Amino acid sequence: MPRPVTLFTGQWADLPLETLAQKAKQWGFDGLELACWGDHFEVDKALEDDGYVRRKRELLERHGLQCFAISNHLVGQAVCDPIDRRHQAILPPRVWGDGDPEGVRQRAAEEMQNTARAARLFGVTQVNGFTGSSVWSKLYFFPPTSQLEIEEGYRDFAARWRPILEVFQEQGVRFGLEVHPTEIAYDIITAQRALEAIEHHPNFGFNFDPSHFVHQFIDPVEFINAFPDRIFHVHVKDSRVQLNGRNSILGSHLDFGDHRRGWDFVSPGRGDVKWDRIIRALNRIGYSGPLSIEWEDSGMDREYGAQEALAMVRREDFAPSAVAFDAAFASKR
């Protein structure tokens, strides 16, 4: 049985959910991973209005679509981050408030707890997102950064996220961190460090997205191998390294889509991610959840790209073998 293929709505939040649902069904998607911005899934309304989640479900059912996960990356980012004016642009006014950094972080943490409660009301047991990080800005160690300072960052992460994860556990909902530069975990080593900081909390795992690994020269399959029981959800996204001797993997302070960048996101199947190896690894660990296309490509029309990406996933996804390929030889013995 092939895995369901969904479309993450975060990059489509400028469209009303009704409009996007019509398009997604027409294109052939099995469901939507709803972003908690735009009108796609609003946490406050889900908790305040008894009919809100029912109407969202009816909308999806009307178009023959499923929902396996909701995602609240934008608010999650503010839980651990050093807060500045950039965050105001991505946060709901009720979370931003007066902009006092610690107040923003605390309100973001409360909103993430409420996201778990809203997910349960909606009948979804998976929430994806970001955590933010108080130490990402100390990535390049000059002036020198001590390991004591880095450890303090992981203690800060644990102190802020443990109470959130307790609510997730109470609600029977899991949180999948999208391991990503700017987060508390951005590679295999930091992902292990994050797990250790929260004492391997059972409701904390990963939204696996290989596009954030390949331009760091990390093998995405090695991430799956390292955390087979923590792959809670999968994003299908791609990136392409385009180093030319003049640029670097640090992005050169250039916008996505600028041809001078050392790497960029591209439509799934057009980058450096090797999907066959990933599908085999997911089969090996028994992952049967959705493959959710997070479509980002500054050089391609998104409606064309979403359909092309869906066709690629349908082509690449396959079930594991139920028998060894040489089992037939046994009958000759």
Image (cartoon, rainbow, N blue to C red):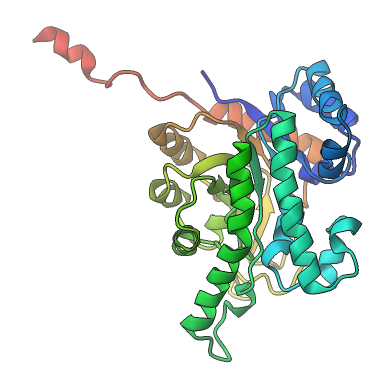
Q: How many labels does the image show?
A: 0
Q: Can residue 295 be seen in this view?
A: no
Identify the residue shown where x is 55% and y is 62%.
Answer: 186
Residue 117 lies in quadrant: top right
Q: Is residue 277 left or right of residue 85?
A: left
Which residue appears farthest toward the left when viewing the image?
333
Which residue appears farthest toward the bottom when viewing the image?
143
On screen, 129 above or below 56?
A: below
On screen, 147 above or below 301?
A: below
Q: Is residue 21 visible?
A: yes
From the image, which quarter does the C terminus lie in? Answer: top left
Residue 99 lies in quadrant: bottom right
On screen, 106 above or below 34?
A: below
Identify the residue shown where x is 45% and y is 51%.
Answer: 223
On screen, 177 above or below 88?
A: above
Q: Is residue 90 left or right of residue 276?
A: right
Across and down, in percent, residue 136 comes to 61, 72
Identify the residue shown where x is 72% and y is 74%.
Answer: 82
Residue 182 lies in quadrant: bottom right
Across and down, in percent, residue 312 comes to 61, 32
Foreground of the two, 78 or 209? 78
Foreground of the two, 40 or 10? 40
Identify the residue shown where x is 75% and y is 70%.
Answer: 254
Across and down, in percent, residue 268 comes to 63, 42
Q: In this view, does 119 lie to the left or right of 86?
A: left
Across and down, in percent, residue 91 comes to 84, 58
